[in-house]
Image (spheres, rainbow, N blue to C red):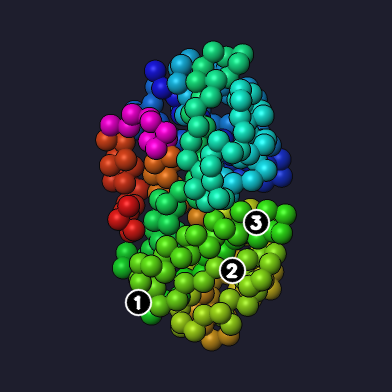
Amino acid sequence: MQALVIVAHGSHLNPGSAQPTYDHADTIRDTGAFDEVREAFWKEEPHFREVIRTVESDEVFVVPLFISEGYFTEQVIPRELRLEGWDPDLWDSDGTDASDVSLAVGDAEKVVHYCGPVGTHDAMTDVIVQRAETVTGDSDVGEGFGLAVVGHGTERNENSAKAIEYHTERIRDLDRFDEVEALYMDEEPEIDDVTDYTDAKDIVVVPLFVADGFHTQEDIPEDMGLTDDFREGWDIPGEVDGQRIWYAGAVGTEAFMADVILERAADAGAELGDALEQVQARTGGTPATGD
């Protein structure tokens, strides 16, 4: 038997924070690829610490629904799952290429295949492009458009920016959009000045966040000038400085994210059958990068 556990941050303050995790779990559950599919959270129930004991399978694939490698994926999650012998060096990553490592859980007699975060997987590039297609309603969006990939950015975790820059560069290589820029909330270049960094008349803005919340639904729309007060909402597209902004909201809410979770599990050895094809058919997702 094999189980999939999707671990995410969750929130005490935002009741909708966990919804993308449940949605992606349901999509994967319907494929029948795993005998068991569970969700677990840091700030909500069910908690990381208890989840391994809730599965009967001997093999458990744990996929973090986080954007970057860092404090949560390298310290909090392995500690709470009680992974024996865990060391971040086992991923042998420069901050963007963590894959997986197999470890025992001492008090549960199970093997956990602990995967890197979804945010640094190559398939996330496809989800960002899919998000641009969704918000514009155009499956061929690209020519005449700029694309801004937005991250939180923080000097406390250099890997946060690495994930943004990694996907930005991969999308540039597609030569699909007129311009592709990496912008941030808390470091330069800032999302506040999005129209200064792109000349295109139309700009798609995709925040590389797992769930919509305070940052994506309040800070970023106001910072860009889409609205003076987030409570009044904003138009899509909205006009700022004579340019049209197509604001997509958190990339983690895109249905095609289920594909990235499955890709992480497959890389760690999970048997998926035709699950990837099922998810792509259900979500309308297509691998834009051809990986």
Where residue 122 sits: x, y (%)?
42, 52
Marks 3/1: CA distance?
A: 32 Å
Marks 3/2: CA distance?
A: 14 Å
Relative vertical location of residue 245 with respect to residue 168 in this rendering, above or below: below
- Tag 3 and tag 2, C-beta contact below 8 Å: no
The mark nearer the N terminus, 2 or 1, is: 1
Tell me the residue at 38%/26% (across/down): 34
Residue 76 occupies quadrant: top right
Foreground of the two, 263 or 143: 263
* Quadrant containing the N terminus in the rendered view: top left
The mark nearer the N terminus, 3 or 2, is: 3
Extreme residue toward the bottom, this view: 242
Marks 2/1: CA distance?
A: 20 Å
Magenta stretch?
Answer: 265-273
Please tell me how crowded label 2 is: few (under 14), some (14-19), or many (20+) other residues with Cα within 10 Å.
many
Where residue 227 sits: x, y (%)?
64, 72
Where residue 44 sits: x, y (%)?
66, 34
Tell me the residue at 54%/46% (across/down): 93
User: Is the magenta region chiefly helix, strand or loop?
Assistant: loop
Tell me the residue at 39%/56% (across/down): 126
Q: In the image, is 104 to the left or to the right of 82?
A: left
What number is the disc on residue 199?
Answer: none
Residue labelled with disc 3: 158
Residue labelled with disc 2: 183
Where residue 120 sits: x, y (%)?
50, 50
Residue labelled with disc 1: 143
Instruction: Check disc 1 and give the amino acid type.
Output: Glu
